[in-house]
Image (cartoon, rainbow, N blue to C red):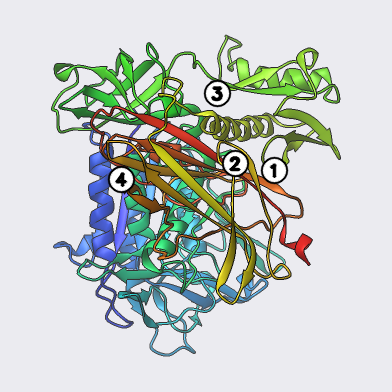
Amino acid sequence: MPQIYAVLVGINKYTTVTPLDGCINDIKAVEAWLKKSHRKKGALNIRRLTDDEPSTELLPTKNNIIAAFDHFSGAKDDDICLFYYCGHGANLIAPKEFAYSDSLIQALVCLDFYGSNPAEPVKGALTDKELGFLIWKTMQDKPGVSFVAITDCCHSGTMTRDVEDFAGVKSTVRGLSMPFISPPLEEFFGFEADNLSGYQLKEGKCSVQQGRHIHFAAAQNDEVAREVTPPGGDTHGAFTYAMLSLLEDEWGLLSYEQLAAGIKGKIQNYFFNGSGPVQTPAITPSYNLPALVKDNIFLSNKNAGQERSYLVQYSTQYGWCVKAGQAQNISVDDEVVVDTDDDEPITFKVKQTFPDFSVIATAAELGPLDQTFRGKVTGQLKKTCRFYFDSAIPDALQQQIWTAQYKNAEGADAVNYPQVELIATSAYQTSQNYVLSILNENIILNGPGQQLTLASTVNPSPDAVLSLLEKLNLVASWDLLLRFDNAAAITAKPYRLDLQYSTGIDAGGYIMTPGQTGGSLNPIAYLSNGSTEPAFKLGITNTGPEPLHITFAYLSADYSIATSGFYMLDVQPGETKWMRFQDSASAEINLNNTSEATVNEYLKVCIAAIPGGIALDNLYQAGVGTRSIGSAKPALPAPGTYWQTETIGFSIEPAARAL
């Protein structure tokens, strides 16, 4: 059973620089989440270094942090090593051997940091070069181990100590206000002039060997990382707070890429309401890791697109349920393999499906009813998305893609992405929605959304072909949601939709024109010489006898799916309500298209007499262009008497066409 070895470092009580308030809160919250999500006996090994530890050996000084890397020595094949740091970050003026384009290096500010004179070398700073050396040393003889480094601190050349207030949220920067002088190269941990194994010195320039790892930073190099204090709440790093809330919502089943996109949306929409500072998480695999590692489930070696794992929880009404249903392409008799606290997983067959969850077992079959588990859905899916090869793709290239999808390493039959169905050239017709073709020596996909470049046609590597299939899997999930509907819904709809979209603008605001629902594409164009984004608004009137609960998903042209940021609407009989987005008081929702071609996008509306509505949380995905936002996790709903979906299309012209 894979294990996690974690070193968690949090520093609040700096004595020589500005103290922080939320770092130890972050570390305690990360530790609690790890214990909850990886609670199997022996699966979790944690060493915590904070400034409130009782032992001096566990205080987060530079030497203690370096010594803590010995904790990773027990990691074996398939295990995960996690280094998580919350505290100040700093820019240091680099020694000449590391002085490249900007003459700066970054550093973690340890508890014993000392730099009272900016003209003298600092003490107690763990530079990024030293951290790189420690990772290289750790991973040298561990080819089957994965290493993840997460730093919730500043890595910016414009760090400040500003404290700002955004809508009642106190915001403090986790970074020092000026660059200090780095120690000389000979004082860097691990550097030995006579034994340059981890450091490489050539023609007066130095580099550090890279151990295989993925680095998840709280902010880009030209941004700052903040800690925030919501009114009446505890202080946390904005990055860590957003990350843990998403992981709780999705039970840790998001990929690194999805997590980064969700964190960005959470930080901007939750803390700063779309305004104020920009803080964008950065995921950087080392050069010796394939780019596909960003598609792995967070702290896992499993690919998120292939895994199809969901939360399993107990409902007093239904029994044990998996949080995936018809919207996730789950059918009766599909198998769900549940990872329990015992060594061996238990396999169940789906007994009953609902729009967004499925029943798999009765009360006594899994364990304590207040616990939650992970369940992987297996078996043949009833619905697939068909991708057609056109005649331009050579047979050998088709076969390479076909083999990667339908054969595993041993050559036995396998389906790597069950939602993806490849169709040979002989069955191709020009009317098909999804066609694989060739343009400028690249395999491209033409479909309802944007044209996608998938891979080079010139000797694509196995990783490139797997990346192609992963992109097709995103497209398949998007397509399946686009077609998601309740075939058994009654013909007489207990509601009325009122769609309006902008066709002009005057002193009073947008000029709105009635639009078409039922899947029709509504023409949307930029206004006022291309400077004003177009908008739409949607009203729902309940014409039936039961309250209706409305949820939304937005399908962008880059095949991303946004499932939160929209308020769920509760509409009583005879009442009309308008769709709302984020914290906007207006019913008008802006659209945009920054590409050079017209794009088609869709709003999926789920209308149900089900308290809590139809949960769409597991449908969230970051697209190829990553335009989507966050996710949420409602509880399992009570049974309802009615549910239906509506699809509303927008054909959005680019801004350039209005000029």
CA separation in Å, label 4 and label 1: 32 Å
Quadrant containing the C terminus in the rendered view: bottom right
Q: Choose mark 4 or mark 1, whichever is in front.
A: 1
Residue placed most toward the observer, 352 or 240? 352
CA separation in Å, label 2 and label 1: 8 Å
From the viewer's perspective, is 109 left or right of 369? right
Q: Position of residue 640 (x, y in %)?
A: 27, 29
Quadrant containing the N terminus in the rendered view: top left
Residue placed most toward the observer, 640 or 227? 640
Q: Identify the disc placed on residue 450.
A: 1
Q: Do we see residue 261 in this rendering?
A: yes
Q: Disc 3 vs disc 1: Cβ atoms closer than 8 Å? A: no
In the rendered image, which residue does mark 2 sit on?
559
Q: Disc 2 vs disc 1: Cβ atoms closer than 8 Å? A: yes
Q: Position of residue 389 (x, y in %)?
A: 76, 22
In the rendered image, which residue does mark 4 sit on?
248
Tag 4: residue type? Answer: Glu
From the viewer's perspective, is 635 left or right of 438? left
Which SS class for mark 1? loop
Q: Residue at x 28, y 40 (%)?
A: 547
In the rendered image, which residue does mark 3 sit on?
419
Compare marks 2 and 4 and give the one earlier in the sequence: 4
Tag 2: residue type? Answer: Tyr
Q: Is residue 630 above or below residue 425?
A: below
CA separation in Å, label 3 and label 1: 20 Å
Which SS class for mark 4? helix
Tag 3: residue type? Answer: Gln
